[in-house]
Amino acid sequence: MEYLSKQRYDELAAELKHLIGEVYPRVTEALAEASAQGDRSDNAGYREARRTQAKTISRIRFLQKVLEHSRVIDTDGLPKDRVCLLSRVEFTNLATNARMKFEIVSPHEMDLEAGKISLKSPIGAALMGKKVGEIAEAQVPSGTLRLRIESITPD
């Protein structure tokens, strides 16, 4: 079971609808055209159309599974005083005194450029359940990070 924000759930559902309703029909049409060009064994256009079809079908199936096994998070039921899913957390790396701010999200929503880290990442997992002022220790490839929670903002 995965938990997603309403926004991300709607984005994935829209992508799935787009793939099924618009992209896949174009892919099958391109495959039929390439197939009509003759010998398939020496037809690069046909092979490319088959690869595109396989990638499209794979993405459709993936999105169907994600949406089938996902639930939209009820943000009203989330704790406000501790780090949880959809919390915006500001913390200080005690080794470097660098301050960072991230939102804790599900793996399907992770986007470092947008400041979103997965709750399953080493830092995300270490922060989960902590309160302001507490120290979290994250095991990362370069060693152990000690992070002090500065603030928590619920979604």
Image: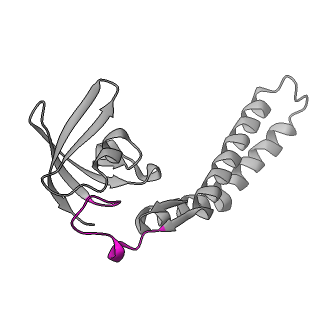
Residue 52 versus residue 16 in the image, above or below = above
Residue 33 falls in which quadrant of the image?
top right
Q: Main secondary structure of the magenta part?
A: loop
Q: Residue at x 64, y 59 (%)?
A: 64
Q: Which image quarter: residue 66?
A: bottom right
- Give the total number of marks visible in the rendering: 0
Q: Is residue 85 magenta?
A: yes
Q: How far across and how far down the image is residue 80, in percent? A: 24, 69
Quadrant of the rendered image containing residue 41: top right
Which quadrant of the figure contains the N terminus?
Answer: bottom right
Picture coordinates of residue 128, whole percent (x, y):
31, 53
Left or right of 99 on screen, residue 52: right
- Residue at the far right in the pictured view: 39
Residue span colored magenta = 72-87
Relative to residue 129, is residue 18 drawn left or right? Answer: right
* Nearer to us in this view, 40 or 70: 70
**Residue 11 appears left or right of 79:** right
Q: Is residue 105 visible?
A: yes
Q: As displayed, is residue 146 above or below residue 88?
A: above
State yes or no: residue 124 in magenta. Answer: no
Q: Is residue 11 visible?
A: no
**Going by the picture, which residue comes out furthest to the bottom?**
76
Please name the residue shown 28% across and 25% down the image: 143
Coloration mode:
one colour
Residue 103, percent from left and from top: 28, 54
Q: Quadrant of the C terminus?
A: bottom left
Residue sitting at 70 percent across and 53 percent down?
24
Q: Position of residue 27 (x, y in %)?
A: 71, 47
